[in-house]
Amino acid sequence: MSDHVLKVQDIDVFYGTSQALFNLSFEVNRGETLALLGRNGAGKSTTMKTIAGVNPTKKGSVELYGKVITGRSAHLIARAGIGYVPEDRQIFPDLSVDDNLTIAIKKGAKGEDDWSLERVYDTLPLLAPLKDRMGGQLSGGEQQMLTVGRALMGNPDVLLLDEPSEGLAPIMVQKIGDLIATLHKLGKTIVLAEQNLHFCLGLADRAVVIDKGTDVFCGTIHELNDNADIKQRYLSV
């Protein structure tokens, strides 16, 4: 039996007549953290949205546990086991932290209910004293934590984190990194889209580098860090 949880195979994605992804392929193994790296505009967020069912594919497929989920609506893909944390967070600003989490309660694809409010607050202790605060009154880092907590409330098999450290103060970047490390230790399968290679070094097992909508590197995170040519050409490092 394959250890692949998620498989992206030869996908082409367009915005109108403009092509954004070209024959993009990669696989994600059970329990690993895979980093999608690339410059701003390389296609990382488009890839995440495509997996989550927000963007349609023109060609190729996305498989979850060997079953094609391409073409399904976003809510059915979420129900199948994909948890999506978008780049712009999309919390409900007029609802409390508690309500933002409660509204997302959903059993997993196989009936799992591992993630309760109590467990989310234990895992994200920053949120616990803020549970009665309106989402719109939270800082950017607090909103990011809330968005991750909301995704966990749906008991996903795969967690997509799109640029979770972007625009945050260094102390919050550290807290987000600690949270990802904790989820990794718990055995969560994570796809982490980032521009910042250094942020991913202690978190990811493997990396895929995207440039102009195409995968140009796939290997371990340490192989990427040792590859000066790839870093200089595609990551400006």
Image: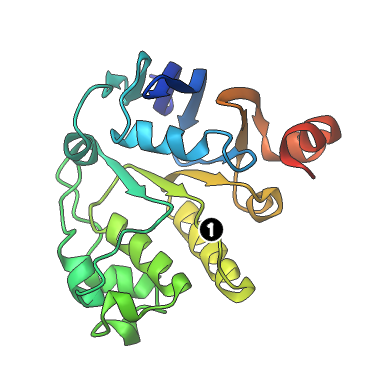
88 over 38 or under it: above or below: below
On the image, the x and y values in percent for residue 23 come to 50, 14
Front residue of this view, candidates 4 and 168: 168
Colour mapping used in the image: rainbow
According to the picture, the residue beneath numbered tag 1 turns out to be 181
The residue depicted at 33 percent of the width and 22 percent of the height is 63
Q: How many labels were placed on the picture?
A: 1
On the image, the x and y values in percent for residue 113 come to 18, 55
- The quadrant of the image that shows the C terminus is top right
Amino acid found under the numbered disc labelled 1: Ala
108 over 63 or under it: above or below: below
On the image, the x and y values in percent for residue 62 come to 35, 22
Left or right of 40 on screen, residue 233: right
47 over 137 or under it: above or below: above
Left or right of 116 on screen, residue 8: right
Instruction: Report the residue that reaches farthest toward the front.
Output: 17
Left or right of 148 on screen, residue 95: left
Name which quarter of the figure residue 90 lies in. bottom left
Q: Secondary structure at mark 1?
A: helix
Front residue of this view, candidates 219 and 74: 74
Front residue of this view, candidates 92 and 105: 92
- Number of residues whose C-alpha sits closer than 10 Å to that of mark 1, classed few (under 14), some (14–19) or many (20 or more): some
The residue depicted at 24 percent of the width and 57 percent of the height is 114
The residue depicted at 60 percent of the width and 75 percent of the height is 171
The residue depicted at 20 percent of the width and 26 percent of the height is 72
Front residue of this view, candidates 128 and 162: 162
On the image, the x and y values in percent for residue 82 come to 30, 40
